Image: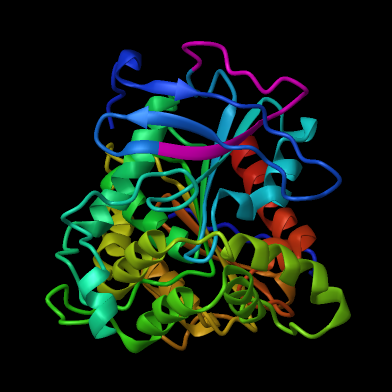
Amino acid sequence: MATRETSHPSLAQKRPRSDYKQKRKTFHTEGGSNAAKRHTVRTPHHGTISYVEALSGESTEVPSGHENSKDSAMTVLFLHGIQGSARSFRLQLERFSDTEFAPIRVLAMDLPGYGETDSIPPPKLGSDNEDREKDRFPLHDFSHIGPYYADAVVALLDALSVSCLSMLVGHSMGGLVAQLFADRHPLRLERLVISSSYVGDGRSACSDVLDSKWTMRLRDLRNLPPKQYGLARAKGMVADPEALDSAAAVEELASIAAEVTSVGLRGGCNLLHVADTTDALKQIRLLQMCRASTSSLTKVLVLIGERDKVVTAEQSRAVMQILSSSSPGNDADASAGSVDSHGISELQCMMVTFPSVAHAAYIEDAEAYNRALADFLKDSKESV
C-alpha cells in the first residue's frame, strides 16, 4: 500500500493519422485578455473538435507524427465546466507552458456543443422547437451521453497522436467527464485531477423532463441576452461577486458563459442529470487494488472550493470518499490548502481545499490553483 503525506502552502488504440483532418492556429494571449485561438480537428465519429494548445518555449508547432511518451513531452489536458469552454483555462495554459515544465504540451478541449466542437448528433439530442412552444425540457435518449463525452476526449487524443496523458484536469462537468474517461480508458492517463466536481445527479435516463435546476438555466439562456446571462452565471461562480477584487474574475467568467449555446448547455444539463459516476470511481479504485495491468492511472487529486455553491464541498468530498474507500464523515478536512493523502494500493489520492474561493478557483484564485496543480505535476514527474 502506497501512503504519501504531503503539504501544500496556503492559499485506446491510436487511429491512423490519415483518418483525421487538422487545422492548426497559433496560440497566443494579448495583454492578459482571453485571446487564445482555437485549433480544430475533424474526427471520424465525433465530427469537428476544437481545442486550445500551448507548448513550452516559443514554438507552437507540433512536428508531424509527434507522439506523447515518457521520452517526449508531457501532455496535460483541461476539460471545462457547463458554463465554460477551452477559454476557461487561459491562466493555466499560460502557467504550464512555462519553460519550468518543458517539454510539455498543454491542451484545453471544447466539449461537445461548446466552442467549435460539434454537438451530439441528432436525433439523439432532438430539436427544441416543440419544447420551446411547450416551455419544457424533456430528455432525449441520453443513456449514451456519458460514453459519448468520454470517447470524444479519446477522439481528440487520437487526432493529436497522444497515447497517454500525463495529467487530465476536469472541472465541474469536465470533472465528471474525466471520471468516465478514466474508467473507460484507464491506459490513456497517468494522473487525474477532479476539480470542483461530483458524481452527477443520477436521475433516471427515462425521466420525462430535466430537473428544475437545469431547466432554469436553459430557460435563462433562452430568454436573456447573452451578456446578461453570462453575468448572472458568473456571479454564482465566485465567493463574493460584489467585491472589488472579484471584478476581473466575474468579467472573464461572464464573457465565457455568454458564448454558451443552447445545444451545448442542453447536452451538458442532460449529462449531469442522468450521470452517476459512483461505479466508475469504484472501478478506478478496484483496478489499482488488484494491481491490474490495464490501468496507467496512479495518482488522483481532488480540488475543492470551500465556498462553492454550484458543487458543494460536501459533494466533492464524496468523490474522495469513494476513491479512498473511507466512510462518510471520517474524511479529514484539507483546509487552508493542506493535502490529505490516502494510500490505496498504488493509487495515491490527495485533496486540496481552497478556503476562500467558490466554483471558479482556476480564475478566482489562479495562483493557488496553479500551485496545487504544479506541485501535483512536479511530484508526479519526479516519481516517474
- The magenta-colored residue range is 49-66
Image location (x, y in percent) of residue 158: 37, 28
Residue at position x 21%, y 82% from top?
209
Quadrant where the N terminus is found in the figure: bottom left
Please provide percent x and percent y for residue 189. 43, 40
In the image, residue 358 lies at what x, y percent? 65, 78
Q: Which is more toward the observer, 21 or 371?
A: 21
Which of 305/214 is in front?
A: 214
Q: Which residue is at a point 44% across and 64% down the rendered structure image?
A: 173
Is residue 291 at least partly visible in the picture? no
Queried whether the magenta region covers residue 52, the answer comes back as yes
| Residue at the image position 39 percent from the left and 85 percent from the top | 213
Position of 242 with respect to 18 (left or right) is right
Please state the horizontal and vertical placement of residue 162, each as a whole percent of the image.
44, 27
Observer able to see residue 99: yes
Q: Quadrant of residue 239?
A: bottom right
Which residue is painted at 83% across and 83% down in the image? Answer: 243
Picture quadrant of residue 248? bottom right
Magenta span dominant secondary structure? loop
The C terminus lies in quadrant: top right
